[in-house]
Each structure stands twice: as C-alpha cells, then as structure tokens.
Amino acid sequence: MPEDEPPHGTILTNARIVTPDGVHHGDLHIADGKITTAAAGDEIDLAGRYVVPGFVDMHVHGGAGASYQRPDRARRAASFHLAHGTTTTMASLVTGDERELADAVTGLADLAADGVIAGIHLEGPYLSRDRCGAHDPALLRAPDLAEFRRLVRLGRGHVRMITLAPELPGALDLVREAAGSGVIAAVGHTEAAGDTVRAAFAAGARVATHLFNAMRPLHHREGGPVAAALNDPRVTVELINDGVHVEPAVARLAFAAAGPRVALITDAMAAAGMGDGDYRLGVMDVQVRGGRATLAGGTTIAGSTITMADAFRRAVTDVGIPIEDAVRAASLTPARALGVADRCGSLEPGKDADLAVLDGDLRVLQVMKQGTIVPRARILGDN
C-alpha cells in the first residue's frame, strides 16, 4: 500500500463522539484494531447515535451467574460485562482463606495473561471487622507481608490492586510494599480516622474503595476516610452509582468535590444480569430482591447487580452530570488509576478501538473490542 494511502478499516460515520471535553458530531476511523486519524473501508452510518469509549470497571466480582472467585467460570462473567460495554474489567476477589485466595489468584492470572481480564483486585483479607460488609469476619486478618508477596508471585504480575484497612497493625508497611511492587493500594472497609487515612495516602495508597460504603462516615468534626479521600488530589475515589449504595444527591456531592477523580464502579456480584434469587459471594449467602443484593437474612448490602452501562446512564439521568463527565468517570479515570490509559479510556488515535454505541436514551446498542464487534448473542439480560 502506498505510504499516503490510509489503511483499510472501518469508519463510523454521522456519530456523536463523546470525548472528555464534550460531544462532537463526526466520523470515527478504525484500522488494525486501533482508532486512527484516517481509514478507508466499510462505512457504518450511526445516524447520530452516541459513541463512547468502552467502560473500564476497576471493581467487579462477577455477573451472569458467575463469580471471579471461581476462575473456571470467570470467562462467563467477563463476557457478560463486555457485551454491556465494559471492554476493560478487573476481577475482584472477596476475602478467603490463604488457600482459596492462592487458588483464585493462580487461575485468574491465566485469564489476565489471555487478555480476558485486566488484572486482579484483592478486596481483603486485611479489612476491619467493624466495617466488614459482606466479607466473612471470621476470615479477616491483620496484614501479612509474606502472604501478600506470595499472592503477588502467584499472580505473575497481574495482581493490580489490594483494598485494606489502614488502621490495622502493619497496614502502612503493606501499603509501602504494594506501592513499591506496582500494586495499587486502596483504602476501604475501614474504621480509621482521617489522620490514619492521610498517613496511608502519604505511604502510597491511591484509591478509596467504594467511597461512603464500608467506612467510617463523614462527620463535621472528624472527616474520616471520606474527607481524606475527597481532599487528596492524588486519590481516585470509587463510586457505586446504583442508587442503592449512594443516593444521587450524595453522588452529586462526590462529583462536585472530586470531579475528574471519581471512578464509577459496579461492585457487581454474580447476580448481575440474572434477576432475583439466591446467590453466593465468596462463602456468604446472598439474596437478591428487587435487584438489591443483601446478605441472606439481613440488611447488609452485598455488592450490586448493575453493569457499568447502568452506572454511566444513572450518572447522567439521575445524578445530573454532563455526559462527557460521566464518560470520563466510567472510562478514562479508572483507566488512569489502573495505568492503562495509554491504550483505553478515551477515543483518541493510537488507542484500542474499544467503544460502545448508545441510543438517545444512553442504552448500549453495540460494543466493539479492539475493532471487532461483540456479538449481540453474548448479551445476557437487559442493560
């Protein structure tokens, strides 16, 4: 092919392309699985539909009846979320004993090597019993550097994040160990006061796990983890925007305070896309009624049943933020937090052609991963 001739690919024409600075009407060129400045080839007229970057979910436990706790079923969960627009997904594990976590990390490392998941997130086991949420308190333990190093080794470079309570003995040492080994340390499931959380951020922690949930609440005399995270420009704050974990008015405050540092997450468990019923989250029994997941026989929330498409749409329709800010929170901000923004998170030339086409109601019509259309048959349930 002559040097001045554009590569053969696909052109999405007549699209409303959503970027971090607004919505632009035009064409999107794709070739060799990448977004490019020019391409020749097939044209697809989108008739004014939205094109957004593929969603990046940095905290998700499963979906379509499958849990990442079971690596043999993890492809089903990843496929479900992919079909709903999540083109980059972490695999989050809840607290387990040493053997269970080791086995899960070993299996998920293979899937990460295959590109099915972007990495592994250890939510626990070094969490506060007072803020354990849906984690089995009997399995929680103090930070253990030897165990952490063993899990990182078993993960073969794919353990990307660990959530821990910074007030536990040895927690700050583990934060430093994580930061030094390329693992994101996240503060969560914590009863810590603000000064302790600030010390964790100073030691290298860079994420607040599902802000407001499973942590000491904000108080005007002791801001705790919420104020510490919202005030630190280095920290990405996760937000479960399902209308259950955080009401829209509070989500609006988070966006007002942290803006480009807010990362929408699902914290979805196996019930996502499956409807009401009885499920498991790790070793815990979970019941889903009316789309709300709680520990069986109680009121403790046990993750969500949403997709990132849901979280994104609610950010616009319920929280009331501009679509470009919602796209940033669902794609670019988590991509930056995970260190993968060089290949995904926005619709820029040179990045992977990971994207979703949305209708006027912001519902997913089509998904593309590295320039390949994801078959609609892989969508299970409504988004």
Image (tube, rainbow, N blue to C red):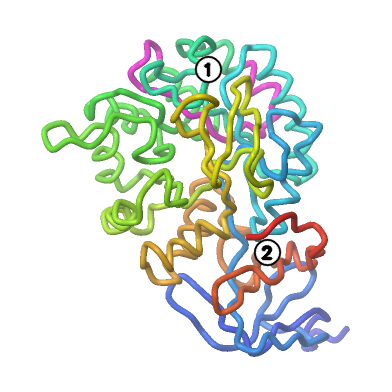
Whether residue 37 appears in magenta in the rendering, the answer is no
**Three-letter code for the amino acid on which mark 2 is drawn:** Asp
The stretch in magenta equals 150-170
Label ID, residue 136:
1
In-image side of 236 versus 158 (left or right): left
Answer whether residue 156 is magenta in the image. Answer: yes
Question: Quick one: label 1, few (<14), some, or many (20+) residues within 10 Å?
Answer: some
**Residue at x 65%, y 47% (from the top left corner):** 275
Query: If the image is split into quadrants, where does the C terminus sit?
Result: bottom right
Asked if residue 22 lies left or right of residue 86, the reply is left
Structural crowding at the residue carrying mark 2, measured as other residues with C-alpha within 10 Å and reported as few (<14), some (14–19) or many (≥20): many
User: Which quadrant of the structure image shows residue 106?
Assistant: top right
Q: Is tag 1's residue or tag 2's residue first in the polypeptide sequence?
A: 1
- The spot of residue 160 in percent (x, y) is 58, 35
Work out whether 94 lies above or below 219: above
Q: Is residue 59 visible?
A: no
